[in-house]
Image (tube, rainbow, N blue to C red):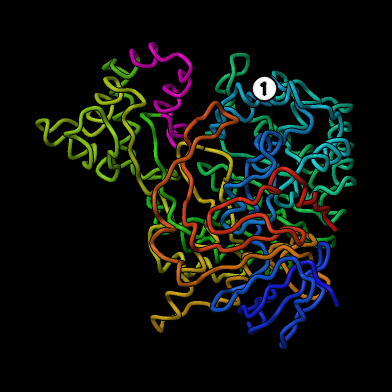
């Protein structure tokens, strides 16, 4: 039997959670042809990979990205593939690039996901040939995809397309019966084309870019109850998923979305909710997520939380960080993000500062940011004397200046040249371990392709595997490596109904060879790399090139040891994966 690829002597994980074994894999075309305990005949095989001492796992799924624009410009999606991700999901947070026109898409993506608006508009103006979900899938399949792609259809996308962005973001405007019917038909058409479901968003600090509707919240936040019920009924009937983001300021939003999963006298609705996190600002909320999932699923629902299984560390250039959108004074500053002089004047104004200090001092109630400038370290600044200090420390050293004023003083003087960092959530290892092993929580939510200057979680899967391996070696395991691999691969593929995530005979030949000895501190290291397609904007990335020695997508070698194969992004190796 001849093979295109043989991967031999590796510790093989099949993606089901079953016991791992030393095995030899033979790949033919885009499938796993043989998994053997005995060595395979290498005669005539053009590529043989010796995986001795290494792990051979199915390709990792990233269930929450915002690559909707980048996949058009750079379909190899190297930043994810290099870390063993072979399937990515588009269309998260109610945003997709399917129906809205280029200018509206720029307003939807630009500020919410910190993808420069100009490139969203220009890319879609030059490249958009599709007018339907089916045509969109055809356009994606015509690209030289690196990884596999699956997609949600965005609620804000279809609402803006049917109502116009202005009417779709007005509290006094409801969709007409014809518009509501058109939204329903658009969703049905997307599901017919193989979309995995619909994403929606109720979070009120996600704001629009541009000038026409600037600082209004996303269209899906204006949806009516009738609209939500009608679209949800379609998803329920079709067995597809609803990805949803509740409004953190209204706990009833979270409860209502979770309860929508219940199927009393009807089919349960798959609901994946954003997001389970150990929030520094509200430590007790960590107990809510597993408990809520257990109750909902115990009552017959099909409910999951999404979770980033690593500390949520963010960076900011000046005040350009989305968490400031959650309170009035911060949102007012970000409203002026394209008017630098006006923003500087605002930040220097004493009335504004009193407003900001009042918001900052509100330490209770639902929120994302802990609002503690003593927990915000300056990492870059033209004034080298403040680097390595927190804004709170700077205030103390300047004679007891309020931390808000210390922060605003530096931003007024240096603008975006003041770069700082803080950890917002997922800071307690024991809570991370609990979340990682909870069946009601899905592991993903990397936001890859978005917030390019704020965070980098492209290697979240590797970081989870390191934590699991380290716990095993320390004699304090919280799950097995086999279970961890299953949670990153087969479990996700099965829940969303995709042909991915497994590595058995007949399965897709998407696999990753990992050197466990290099699952080390390099996974946490800070790195940046320019994005050529965005005028060389320097984005945060991960660089741990010794950990992943080989990545195969569709049976073809695409990456290893920090180097992309010439085939990646030049010839299609990935596919558009259709649900069901």
In the drawing, does residue 202 fall left or right of residue 151?
left
In the displayed structure, would residue 561 be above or below residue 571?
Answer: below
Q: Which image quadrant is residue 441 in?
A: bottom right
Q: Is residue 206 visible?
A: no
Q: Which image quadrant is residue 492 in?
A: bottom right
Looking at the figure, which quarter contains the N terminus?
bottom right
Looking at the figure, which quarter contains the C terminus?
bottom right
Residue 259: % across, % down: 68, 56
Image point 31% across, 30% down: which residue?
418
| Residue 526 vs residue 454, the one in the foreground | 526
Image point 68% across, 65% down: which residue?
511
Q: From this viewpoint, which residue is outermost toward the bottom? A: 38
| Residue 25 vs residue 49, the one in the foreground | 49
In the displayed structure, would residue 559 be above or below residue 217?
Answer: below
Does 494 appear in magenta? no
Image point 76% across, 20% down: which residue?
164
- Which element type, helix, strand or loop, lies under badge 1? helix
Residue 330: % across, % down: 41, 28
In the drawing, does residue 67 fall left or right of residue 204?
right
In the displayed structure, would residue 551 be above or below residue 349?
Answer: below
Q: From this viewpoint, which residue is outermost toward the front? A: 44
Which residue is labeled 1 in the image? 121
In the displayed structure, would residue 248 be above or below residue 468?
Answer: above
Does 333 appear in magenta? yes
Region rendered in magenta = 320-345
């Amino acid at each position: 039997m001849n093979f295109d690829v043989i991967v031999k002597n590796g510790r093989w994980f099949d993606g089901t959670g079953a016991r791992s074994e030393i095995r030899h894999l033979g790949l033919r075309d885009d499938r796993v042809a043989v998994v053997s305990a005995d060595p395979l005949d290498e005669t005539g095989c053009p590529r043989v990979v010796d995986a001795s001492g290494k792990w051979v796992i199915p390709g990792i799924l990233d269930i929450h990205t915002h690559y909707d624009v980048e996949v058009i410009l750079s379909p190899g999606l190297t930043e994810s593939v290099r870390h063993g991700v072979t399937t990515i999901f588009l269309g998260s947070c109610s945003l997709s690039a399917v129906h809205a026109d280029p200018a509206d898409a720029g307003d939807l993506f630009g500020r919410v996901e910190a993808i420069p608006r100009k490139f969203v508009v220009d890319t879609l103006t030059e490249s958009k040939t599709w007018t339907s979900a089916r045509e969109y899938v055809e356009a994606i399949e015509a690209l030289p995809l690196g990884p596999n792609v699956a997609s949600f259809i965005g609620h804000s996308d279809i609402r803006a397309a049917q109502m116009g962005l202005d009417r779709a973001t007005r509290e006094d405007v409801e969709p007409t019966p014809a518009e509501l019917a058109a939204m329903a038909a658009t969703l049905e058409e997307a599901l017919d084309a193989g979309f995995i479901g619909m994403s929606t968003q109720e979070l009120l600090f996600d704001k629009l870019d541009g000038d026409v509707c600037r600082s209004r919240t996303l269209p899906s936040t204006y949806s009516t109850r009738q609209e939500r019920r009608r679209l949800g009924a379609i998803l329920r009937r079709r067995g597809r998923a609803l990805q949803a983001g509740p409004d953190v300021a209204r706990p009833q939003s979270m409860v209502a979305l979770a309860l929508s999963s219940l199927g009393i006298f009807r089919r349960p609705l798959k609901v994946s909710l954003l997001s389970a996190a150990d929030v520094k600002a509200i430590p007790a909320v960590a107990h809510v997520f597993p408990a809520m999932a257990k109750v909902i699923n115990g009552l017959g629902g099909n409910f999951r939380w999404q979770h980033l299984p690593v500390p949520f560390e963010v960076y900011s250039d000046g005040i350009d960080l989305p968490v400031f959108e959650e309170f009035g004074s911060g949102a007012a500053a970000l409203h002026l993000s394209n008017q630098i002089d006006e923003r500087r004047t605002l930040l220097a104004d004493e009335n504004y500062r009193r407003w900001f200090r009042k918001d900052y001092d509100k330490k209770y109630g639902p929120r994302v940011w802990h609002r503690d400038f003593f927990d915000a370290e300056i990492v870059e600044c033209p004034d080298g004397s403040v680097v390595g200090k927190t804004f709170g420390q700077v205030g103390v050293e300047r004679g007891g200046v309020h931390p808000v004023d210390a922060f605003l003083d530096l931003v007024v003087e240096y603008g975006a040249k003041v770069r700082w960092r803080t950890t917002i959530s997922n800071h307690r290892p024991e809570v991370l371990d609990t979340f990682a092993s909870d069946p009601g929580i899905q592991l993903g939510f990397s936001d890859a392709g978005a917030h390019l200057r704020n965070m980098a979680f492209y290697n979240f899967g590797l970081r989870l595997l390191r934590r699991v391996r380290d716990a095993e070696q320390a004699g304090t395991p919280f799950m097995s490596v086999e279970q961890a691999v299953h949670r990153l691969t087969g479990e996700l593929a099965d829940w969303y109904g995709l042909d991915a995530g497994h590595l058995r005979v007949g399965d897709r030949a998407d696999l990753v060879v990992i050197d466990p000895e290099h699952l080390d501190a390099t996974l946490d290291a800070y790195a940046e790399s320019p994005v050529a397609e965005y005028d060389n904007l320097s984005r945060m990335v991960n660089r741990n090139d010794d950990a992943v020695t080989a990545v195969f997508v569709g049976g073809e070698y695409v990456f290893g040891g920090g180097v992309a194969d010439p085939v990646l992004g030049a010839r299609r190796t990935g596919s558009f994966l259709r649900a069901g």
